[in-house]
Image (tube, rainbow, N blue to C red):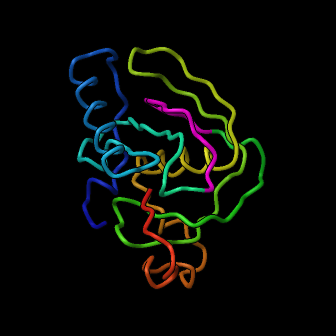
Amino acid sequence: MGDTRLLQRSHEVERFDTPELHALLADMHDTMHALDGAGLAAPQIGVGLRVVVFGMARNPRYPQAEPVPYTVLINPVLTALNDNLEDGWEGCLSVPGMRGLVPRHTDLRYEGFDQYGNRIDRFVSGFHARVVQHECDHLDGILYPMRIRDLRAFGFHDVLFPDQPLQDD
């Protein structure tokens, strides 16, 4: 947090199925899995492109979360399907050790492309919708603390949840 690259809008990907894009995705995939993450956005590793990866089956850091299919999402467009918001605790690899209560849309449509330029169009809810919104916020220079409505619900994980292991997103 504080790195100016995390506060900028990322650029659209113009070419798909290139060696550079595949190398970026391999790096993102490896980084996300090495940290037991649920998702990662390109700006989090210093690349200003509109690329996110997310997904998990079972994850010890998210024991109650439903599985989310592994997805490469490029140039995403998110559309809330209704006005329903739900507060949920979030963390982030870019804001290490912290947690905050963040409102997110419960039902979402996301569109975009995979690494080969194939179209993606999904309707999701719950944890899947939260992860997509969190990661895509990074592409617009938004970190989750910017969405917290009450800063009394923001703090260090070990203070807020002393009996739970750290789970950064």
Q: Residue at x 42, y 73 (%)?
A: 98
Q: Residue at x 32, y 17 (%)?
A: 15
> Is residue 73 highlighted in magenta?
yes
Residue 63 position within the rendered picture, expressed as x and y whole percent measured from the top left: 57, 56
- Tell me the quarter of the picture where residue 157 sits: bottom left
140 lies above or below 164: above
In the image, 160 versus 16, the foreground residue is: 160
Residue 131 position within the rendered picture, expressed as x and y whole percent measured from the top left: 54, 48
Task: Give the quadrant of the C terminus.
Answer: bottom left
130 lies above or below 71: below
Tell me if 48 is positioned left or right of 68 in this view.
Answer: left
Q: Residue at x 49, y 32 (%)?
A: 70
Tell me if 144 is positioned left or right of 22 in this view.
Answer: right
Q: Residue at x 58, y 70 (%)?
A: 101
Tell me if 17 is positioned left or right of 105 in this view.
Answer: left
Instruction: Label the magenta part by its dominant secondary structure.
Output: strand
Q: Which residues are magenta?
A: 64-78
- Tell me the quarter of the picture where residue 114 sits: top left
